[in-house]
Image: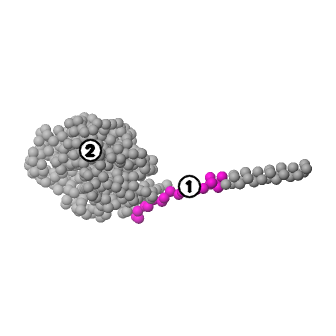
Amino acid sequence: MYVRAFQNQKTFSYLLMFSCLAVFLLSCKENSKEEPAAPELEFALNNAGLSLPEGFKVIIAADSLKNPRHIAVTDNGSIYAKLRELDDDNGVVFLEDTDQDGIMDRQEGFGNYAGTGIGISQGYLYASSDEAVMRYTLDEDQKVTNKTAPDTIVSGLLNKRQHASKSLTLDGAGNIYVNIGAPSNACQETDRTLGSPGMMPCPILDSAGGVWQFRTDKLLQTFGDGKLYATGLRNVIGLDWNHTDQSLYVTQHGRDQLNTLYPDLYDVKANADLPAETLYRVEEGDDAGWPYVYYDQNQQKKILSPEYGGDGQKTGGEDALDPLVAFPAHLAPNALLFYSGDQFPERYKNGAFIAFHGSWNRAPEIQEGYNVVFVPFQNGKPTGEWEVFAEGFAGVDEVRSPRDAAHRPTGLAQGPDGSIYVSDDSGGTIYRIVYDGE
């Protein structure tokens, strides 16, 4: 009897052991199941014709859009693009990548107004027409909840067609900064007219030619509710709030037609070469000097404008702001982005990317620009020379007319993974630039 009990106990122990082993093996099998592989990104063949530093690759995130200007990227990698022209009565396009291959495969439009400016801040999407700034509420997926009934932040901004776009940026502390470009070349009594003198003082500066600050927590503001934050800026389509030093930076489009208006002072070569396009760090109350002076990158001086008695050599604007960086003339810096991501190599951290839309007024010289450049920064100051980061957008070796360029960089945005997006309002493309190097 004792033997039989022992054998039964032994059998039970074996059964218990094998049961535990089976449960353990099943558990291991369940735990060893591999996570689904992330979809592979669809990189463009030959980087879509772009030249980039080693290790960078290109994805065509979207194409065939209608004049996309500035762009904003959500925390989950979707894109909002502001359209310069309405597409089926829509001025904003929302783009989603549903299969995570890097290519936007779902599109939805809203906002029955054209324009340039767009940005995301603290649960809201902001978008501008040429006269107003609207605000949309975002849900937890950062999708707009009030497409047909946006809040109006500010309306009644000056629009006289020339330099009309209202670019914007936000500081995350309740303020929005809006460019109001000057409807003028150099504040002449008769604009762009041979021999017409400059008005002194320039009356345009009362309502344009600068950056205005408005509150984001106040609806239905008008121009009079805003604060002139910085003046003497002819047209700054590129604006960005640098959260590293909590400062506003802008890129200015310089004046035109020095040779056309003052042929006795400037030849066609000087006309193609002057004045510089400029990058400024601006604080409240700053004056960059337009229209009274321009910056000559060759002499590295602020030069008195010919409309105000200048001869190409006389300096002026002693109290006017000096640029941080001066670029070649007429390249049209349309977007500015301070890089805060971790994907790119360390040297790019906190540096500035600038998208140059490309020139139209360098004839008989070839047109230039049509690229994205990089300026290394540290502690709010450039630490080295600017360099071309991405080029080849134009698709031709020499651009004689802007119409020759297949693509023209216009907007910049940073994705949640640290990649950079570049919009093009000529070919309707949005590029995504990814660092894939070691």
Mark 1 secondary-structure assignment: loop
Query: Looking at the magenta stretch, what is its main secondary structure?
Result: loop
| Vertical comparison of 86 with 247: above or below | below
Q: As shown in the figure, which amino acid type bears the numbered disc 2? A: Val
Give percent across and percent down for residue 335.
Answer: 30, 49
Magenta region, residue range: 27-46
Q: Is residue 307 left or right of residue 225?
A: left
Earlier in the chain: of badge 1 and badge 2, it is: 1
Query: In the image, is residue 44 part of the stretch drawn in magenta?
Result: yes
Q: Residue at x 20, y 42 (%)?
A: 156
User: Which residue lies at the image location 41% right of the left edge and 48% below the top edge?
Assistant: 141
Q: Which residue is found at the position 9% from the left and 45% from the top?
A: 189
Residue lying at the far front of the rendered structure: 1
Residue 310 in picture, x, y percent from top left: 14, 44
Percent from the top left, x then y, of residue 228?
23, 37
User: Does the image show residue 408?
Assistant: no
- Dot 1, how many residues are within 10 Å of its Cα: few (below 14), some (14-19), or many (20+)? few
| Viewer-closest of 360 and 327 | 360
Q: Which residue is mark 1?
A: 35
Seen from the viewer's position, the closer of residues 39 and 197 is 39
431 within the magenta span: no
Q: How is the image coloured?
A: one colour
- The residue that appears at 18% across and 53% down in the rendered structure is 271
What amino acid type should be assigned to the residue bearing mark 1? Glu
- Local secondary structure at mark 2: strand
Taking depth in this image into account, of 277 and 27 the one nearest to the observer is 27
| 368, above or below 281, in the image | below
User: Residue 359 appears in which quarter of the rendering?
Assistant: bottom left
Residue placed under numbered mark 2 in the picture: 133
Query: Disc count in the image?
Result: 2
